[in-house]
Amino acid sequence: MMRIIQYFLPILLFLFSLNCNNKKSEEKNEDLVFHLLLDAYMNGSNVPCVSTQTVPLEPIGTWTVGGNPFFYSETLPISLHRSLPMVQLFFEQNNTFGGALFPVFYENRSISSSGFLNRDVFSGLGQGSSTSMFPYGKDTAYATDPAVSILNTDSISSPLGVEFNLEIPVSLSATFISSCKTLDSDEMEFQTNHADSADSGLYHFWQTEKNLDVNLIFVNNGPDLAYPDQTLTALSVALNRWKENYSQGPVRININFSSTTLDSVEYSSIYDLSTSFIFPGTLGGLFTTTSYVGKPNALNVFIVKEELQYGGVLGVSGGIPGPATLLGTRQSGVAVFIETHRLTSNTGQPLTHDELLLLGETMSHEAGHFLGLWHVVEAFGDTGEVGSRDPLRDTPVCGIWNDLNQDGFLSVLECSGFGPYDSGGRNMMFWSGMVGFAQGQITAEQGWILRLNPLVY
């Protein structure tokens, strides 16, 4: 998901609505959860506790989406409970083949008719690779269609299962990435409320502080530097803004920064922000070919000079969520673009104080995507449908009726109120940013999701 600056032409986000026909699938691999947990006990408390398992996939039948045949796999079990509170899925196809990919979750593995769609399906299908996770919110009924309620705070696993759906049935694999940190007592007891105003959830305070390691990667082309001073000190204004946002009571995540450089003529500028391709100059190519500078237990943030596809994109995440701990995939990272953050400074100069603050907001925002957060509302406003806003109950809402200039898009200022239906512009996950406008508000449920991510410890 990308974020753009307010004074550039907005980029439309098209929804792909699915009409799910009845279908049946078989259940196998009941021991998958055992394999997922094999390495969990090797992790200490001062590093992320992550368990991964990659399985090959074979199609067992077909169904129809919009008149086109889609193949589906067997149903694989997912364990979700207080000591395994979040599961991410990374679904990948060999680069030689194209076609859409997406997962569909089931509430009960023994009842195929209990199938439901997760939030990610309603914003388009993955091409070549796809990410998903469960849960997307504390109240899972708010994140799914049809509405279902599944707990991840019990001591006994919920009987979840997932099948994988694809257009071309060759060269497929799925990776399960599980967070194996036991929930704190207040995380287990946390309850959400529907947003009544922009203040909803803003005054929550978690009992314990968590940690997140961030690896900044400056992408240079010889003497043509992504940023003139490539030190943490030079970016301290931006990094401190990010730290301030995540240190708030509703989040309480401390960020530990490190940095490195990458010399690459192919990726010092990005001309295609798609993760569907791995050609030079594409975002997917950048993430795929640079695993040697990444850190598996960190969020890897690539600092790139510019993007050329739209000219107004501030940053972009490889996925919602990004595949935690997986390096060298088409979705393994976050990219932020220096030139888009300039308002008064010139190319080759350090960013001004206000420009650095905007860069910090962008880093916070794109990291939020990678860790599992959607836009509080999409560019065209909350329509009441699953795909028009995030899947969280306590985040602000803003409808298209607030489009005062009638350009078809909601601006930061049009959603800067404090009422139940005119707010969200101040939230870290609003769909666009604006120089000089603080967007550091984070609600308790957003913080709950950030704290559950496998990279957070």
Image (cartoon, helix red, strand yellow):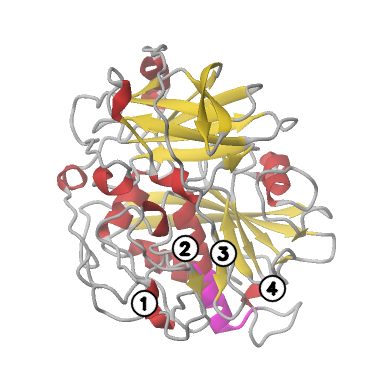
Q: Is residue 425 visible?
A: no
Residue 395: name its quadrant. bottom left
Q: Quadrant of the N terminus?
A: bottom right
According to the image, label 2 marks what residue? 364
Decide: is 209 above or below 404: above
Picture coordinates of residue 42 (x, y %)?
41, 24
Query: Which one is nearer the viewer's eye here, 192 or 364?
Result: 192
Of badges 2 and 1, the one in the foreground is: 1
According to the image, label 3 marks what residue? 12
Magenta segment: 351-361
Image disc number at residue 401: 1
Q: Residue at x 57, y 24 (%)?
A: 173
Helix, strand or loop for disc 3: loop
Q: Amino acid at mark 3?
A: Leu
State how many labels appear: 4
Main SS, magenta residues = helix
Helix, strand or loop for disc 1: helix
Q: Amino acid at mark 2?
A: Ser
Q: Residues within 10 Å of mark 2 (few under 14, many from 20)?
A: many
